[in-house]
Image: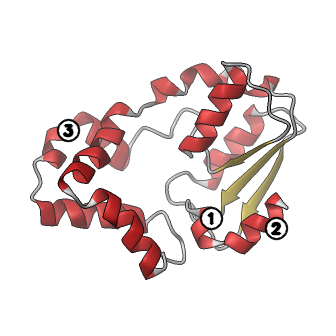
Amino acid sequence: DVGGVVALRAALLEKVAFSTLTLINVASLKGWGTGGFFQTIREHPEAFTNLPDWASDALIEGKIRTGSHPGLRPEALAVYLSHWQTPEGRRAFYRQYVQGGEEHTDDLQVHLASLTMPIQVLWGREDQWLSLDYAERLKQALPPHATFAAIDGAGHMVPEDMPGELLRHLG
């Protein structure tokens, strides 16, 4: 989702020319940073940064697990957790929510319809972080030539959940 925002910012604000653009579960419209988990951390960071390590580790693991619909392979989950379940990793996990916010994508929204390159939007049908309703709003904000496909069996972590189906769309 963040990689797609970086690509959109480059194309729309920095005028970087891409021959094509594929967006996978990209957080680019209002609504991605409000409510629930994201907003609670932004509003009460000290409540999270003061958690004991065991509680923080459980919360981080729970959040990561919700990104996958079928469940991450144990070795993939271990890699994701290895980055976050250290003293600096825990601080960075919460910091990304505190520092992230819709103010970083607000300026993109008025420009989305002006994209001229071929655009493909791919979305995990079972995404618990950014729903298909959100994807539909993005589709409406993009130019009419943008294509959209929902990937069955995938959550937010499409490359982890359905790598073969993702490659089929990218091929």
Residue type of the residue flagged with mark 3: His
Graded by Cα atoms within 10 Å as few (under 14), some (14 to 19) or many (20 or more), the crowding at tag 3 reads few
Q: Residue 165 in the image: x percent, y percent?
A: 75, 70
Q: Which label lies toward us, 3 or 2?
A: 2
What residue does disc 1 label?
159
Q: Position of residue 13 (x, y in %)?
A: 66, 18
Numbered mark located on residue 147 in the image: none
For the point 30% across and 57% down, which residue is it? 84
Q: Secondary structure at mark 3?
A: loop
Q: From this view, report whether residue 14 is shown above or below residue 142.
A: above
Report the number of numbered marks: 3
Query: Which label number is shown at residue 168?
Result: 2
The reply, left or right, for residue 11 in relation to residue 3 is right
Which of marks 1 and 3 precedes in the sequence? 3
At label 1, the amino acid type is: Pro
The percent coordinates of residue 10 (x first, y second) are: 66, 27
User: Which residue, given by chain and number where applicable, does mark 3 sit on?
Assistant: 44
Q: SS class of the residue under badge 1?
A: helix
What percent of the width, then of the height, locates residue 1?
57, 46
For the residues labelled 2 and 1, the Cα–Cα distance comes to 12 Å
